[in-house]
Image: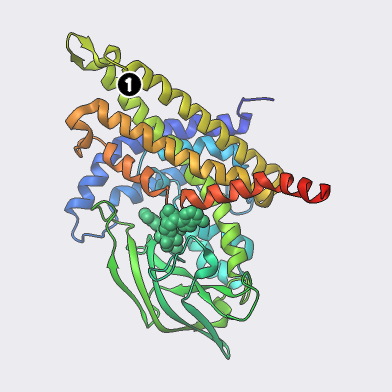
Amino acid sequence: MDFAHSPKARRFIERVAAFMADHVVPAEAEHRRQLKTGALPWNQPPVMEELKAKAKAAGLWNLFLPDEEHGAGLSNVDYAPLAELTGRSFIAPEVFNCNAPDTGNMEVLVQYGSPEQKERWLAPLLEGRIRSAFCMTEPEVASSDATNMRATAIVEGDEIVLNGRKWWSTGIGHPHCRFVIFMGLTDAQAHKHRRHSMVIVPLDAPGLVIERMLPVFGALHEPHGHGEVSFTNVRVPLANVIAGPGRGFEIAQGRLGPGRIHHCMRAIGVAERAFELMCQRALSRTAFGKPLAHLGGNGDIIANARMAIDQARLLTLKAAWMMDHVGVKGAMSEISQIKVVAPSVAQMVVDQAIQMHGGAGVCDDLPLTELFAAARVLRLADGPDEVHRALVAKLALKPYAAAMDASR
Ligand SMILES: Cc1cc2nc3c(=O)[nH]c(=O)nc-3n(C[C@H](O)[C@H](O)[C@H](O)COP(=O)(O)OP(=O)(O)OC[C@H]3O[C@@H](n4cnc5c(N)ncnc54)[C@H](O)[C@@H]3O)c2cc1C
């Protein structure tokens, strides 16, 4: 077993780490300032476009995409340390054109898109000229079960008509967002995995209304945001259906595999940044005559956080390795395992870092509250912990159930 990164990954790690230190982290404050003082509340800070241009020129672009033609051609294992680095900063994923949900939407279009869909929607996404959203979750139904989706996508001649309400559509507030991928019920009588379709809907389609932007712990996450969106008799050409009617569930499953593990890789970055801040604080602040690091159980807290992050990273890399070697289907247990472990570890470490900072930990001067929210919501987004645990248990029990059946 070789724990070293490949030479290709090492070269990218060096370049991404240097780019983060030289350009991204120093620009975070300016990005925030431009967002808060821009002419529009949902403007694109000019500094983001400058950073994107620099990253593109440096060849640090679309790193997430294993496809050689459109992306960097990196395996999941090679991409993992790069996603971890970008997870350390809120602005970094977009800088490298590696931000959700565009990454998932690009993967879907690379894998299932028609030549026309690729030309019209994929090409500008790959270039970072536009942004997109993914509209699956609905307020009215338990959306952790993708077969529950109730919004409709009904074929009428050479058009498809969409009705329903979606929410938590991340990225829909971005001023560059131009389309969404909508998941809707096409044939309620079909097999439960063949009922839904994925449809490309231009953001300016008549009948599509962003009803409101949803706050996360009070923050709107501008300029991306998360929208509640109504679709009332929205008509788009049948050619906008991805891979044809009835393939929605299959596409959703394929889309969520890489997306989930990217989230986990970034969650390790969240944990590492919080850990770094915690250690610096523990050494630099003195109370009762000693640095915080040497008071009470703080040494144990630091040691436990170090061990938990390293365990989570190893499991993330194993899941990535499985995806590379046996595909998303064969790696289902590992993907679900890490989807439970990585956000929980990140949440725990950020919480401890907040505690070690005292009052400063919950003030916006530090990124800890944002890091906490990012880790916490990840325990819901792309499937709540319980759903992933249920899958891990089902797969773990399978061989024992089969053995019991055989012995009967
Ligand atoms: C910040 C954020 C961004 C998001 N971005 C997007 C996006 O871009 N596009 C999109 O479509 N969606 C997005 N989502 C939605 C997210 O994927 C859903 O919230 C999630 O899948 C859960 O669906 P639900 O909210 O309907 O919860 P429900 O399905 O109602 O589940 C509620 C709770 O029930 C429990 N539960 C459910 N199933 C089980 C089970 N099998 N066993 C035990 N307990 C169970 C769990 O505790 C779960 O948290 C986002 C969510 C957040 C918070």
Q: Nearer the viewer, residue 228 or 70?
A: 228
x 61%, y 77%: residue: 245
x 82%, y 47%: residue: 407
Q: Which amino acid does label 1 sit on?
A: Cys
* Left or right: 256 as drawn, with respect to 67: left
Where is residue 149? Give x, y as percent. 49, 71
Residue 209 appears in the rendering: yes
Q: Coloured how?
A: rainbow
Instruction: In the rendered view, tell whether residue 371 sits above or below residue 165.
Output: above
Question: For residue 316, which quarter of the picture?
Answer: top right
Where is residue 196? Give x, y as percent. 57, 73
x 26%, y 21%: residue: 281
* Left or right: 46 as drawn, with respect to 322: left
Instruction: In the rendered view, tell whether residue 93 sits above or below residue 282.
Output: below
User: Residue furthest toward the bottom?
Assistant: 157
- In the rendered image, which quarter contains the N terminus? top right
Instruction: In the rendered view, tell whether residue 332 sits above or below residue 321.
Output: below
Secondary structure under the numbered disc 1 in the rendered image: helix
Q: Quadrant of ligand 1?
A: bottom left
Q: Which of 406 and 141 is in front in this view?
A: 406
Question: For residue 9, which quarter of the picture?
Answer: top right
Where is residue 280? Give x, y as percent. 30, 21
x 62%, y 64%: residue: 250
Q: Which of 364 and 60 is in front in this view?
A: 364
Instruction: In the rendered view, tell whether residue 308 sits above or below residue 255.
Output: above
Q: Which residue does the numbered mark 1 point to in the structure image? A: 279
